[in-house]
Image (cartoon, grey):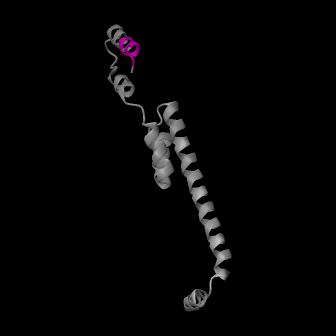
């Protein structure tokens, strides 16, 4: 919180002594959310990105910046989950295609190798 806001709150409290400005000071002195931590957790551990979505969109949504950060955590989480599922399914399809190339019995592979070496 910059000095101008603190001064304006002090002046307001002096002009209006019956008004308690402590909640305003507490809200404005809170540190902003750490964006990089939210982004990294959403990307590296996708299900835990939903925690920040719930926290910043539904619970602690006193500023537009926090709501945007919560929605960004949701999009990153969903995107990484979709990308992971797509990559996994492509890998499974690739393995299914290469499966017929391998012999059913591993002993056959050893016999073929021995025949090639001799």
Q: Of 109 and 3, which appears nearest the observer?
A: 109
Does the rendering let one see residue 59? no
Residue 26: x and y in percent read 34, 26
Q: Is residue 92 left or right of residue 28?
A: right
Quadrant housing residue 13:
top left
Q: Main secondary structure of the magenta part?
A: helix
- Image point 38% across, 23% down: which residue? 24
Q: Is residue 14 above or below residue 61?
A: above
Residue 19 magenta-highlighted: no
Q: Is residue 72 above or below residue 1?
A: below
Q: Of 118 and 66, which appears nearest the observer?
A: 118
Q: Is residue 9 left or right of residue 87?
A: left
Q: Is residue 38 above or below residue 88?
A: above
Quadrant location of the N terminus in the rendered image? top left
Quadrant location of the C terminus in the rendered image? bottom right
- Image point 57% across, 92% down: which residue? 111
Residue 71: x and y in percent read 55, 42
* Residue lying farthest to the front in this orientation: 118
Magenta residues, as a range? 2-8
- Image point 39% across, 17% down: which residue? 2
Residue 40: x and y in percent read 47, 46
- Image point 45% across, 48% down: which residue? 41
């Amino acid at each position: 919180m910059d000095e101008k806001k603190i001064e304006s709150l002090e002046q307001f409290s002096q002009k209006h002594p019956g008004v308690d400005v402590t909640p305003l000071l507490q809200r404005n002195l809170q540190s902003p959310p750490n964006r990089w931590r939210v982004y990294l957790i959403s990307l590296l551990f996708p299900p835990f990105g939903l925690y920040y979505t719930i926290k910043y969109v539904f619970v602690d949504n006193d500023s537009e910046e926090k709501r945007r950060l919560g929605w960004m955590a949701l999009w990153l989480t969903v995107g990484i989950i979709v990308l992971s599922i797509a990559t996994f399914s492509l890998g499974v399809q690739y393995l299914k295609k290469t499966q017929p190339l391998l012999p059913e019995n591993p002993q056959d592979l050893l016999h073929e190798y021995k025949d090639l070496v001799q």
